[in-house]
Image (cartoon, rainbow, N blue to C red):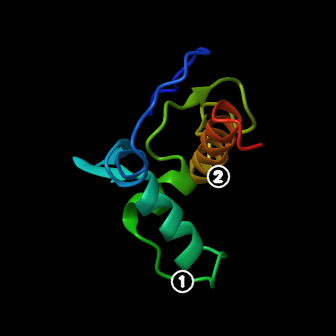
């Protein structure tokens, strides 16, 4: 995942933003905003909680995709990985929607 840092507004058709642009890759499979949002809504507490989540979604939750942080933690030599990236992605998607609404004067 790479953040788009800056203040420049990038226009995209809604369909491309929602289901065309890749935001996460796991096992060489590309995932879009639509897939991540629907996984959250349909299986992870939105509409209901499903015991069996998709593999890529579990990876986002567990932090298995990310760079780990190693230090003199207790116990020493243990690497800690950031977890719950799915929540960070959902917040980013909400920010993009709000930024679009502000850009177009809808708010």
Q: Nearer the viewer, residue 17 or 27?
A: 17
Left or right placement of residue 13 versus residue 103 in this view: left
Where is residue 40, by image quadrant? bottom right
Left or right placement of residue 92 versus residue 67 in this view: right
Question: For the N terminus, which image quadrant?
Answer: top left
Are there few (<14), some (14-19), or many (20+) residues within 10 Å of tag 1?
few
Q: Farthest left residue?
A: 28
Are there few (<14), some (14-19), or many (20+) residues within 10 Å of tag 2?
some
Q: Residue at x 45, y 52 (%)?
A: 33
Q: Nearer the viewer, residue 96 or 36?
A: 96
Where is residue 103, by image quadrant? top right
SS label for mark 2 = helix
* The label number, if any, that marks residue 97 in the structure image: none
Residue 20 location, x and y as percent? 31, 48
Marks 1, 2: nearer the viewer: 2
Q: Residue at x 56, y 56 (%)?
A: 61
Q: Residue at x 48, y 62 (%)?
A: 58
Q: Is residue 2 above or below residue 82?
A: above
* The label number, if any, that marks residue 87 in the structure image: 2
Measured Cα–Cα span from mark 1 to mark 2: 18 Å
Question: For the C terminus, which image quadrant?
Answer: top right
Q: Is residue 72 above or below residue 22?
A: above
**CB within 8 Å, label 1 to label 2:** no
Q: Residue at x 60, y 28 (%)?
A: 69
Residue 94 location, x and y as percent? 65, 48
**Chain-order first, disc 1 or disc 2:** 1
SS label for mark 1 = loop
Residue 49 location, x and y as percent? 62, 82
Q: Nearer the viewer, residue 85 or 31?
A: 31
Residue 86 location, x and y as percent? 57, 53
Q: Farthest front residue?
A: 105
The residue carrying mark 1 is: 51
């Amino acid at each position: 995942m790479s953040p788009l840092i800056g203040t420049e507004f990038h226009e995209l058709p809604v369909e491309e933003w929602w289901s065309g642009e890749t935001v996460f890759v796991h096992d060489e499979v590309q995932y879009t905003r639509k897939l991540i949002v629907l996984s959250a809504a349909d299986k992870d507490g939105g509409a209901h909680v499903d015991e069996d989540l998709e593999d890529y979604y579990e990876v986002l939750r567990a932090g298995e995709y990310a760079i780990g942080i190693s230090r003199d933690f207790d116990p020493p030599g243990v690497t800690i990985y950031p977890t719950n990236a799915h929540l960070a992605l959902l917040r980013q998607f909400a920010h993009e929607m709000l930024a679009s609404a502000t850009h177009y004067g809808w708010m």
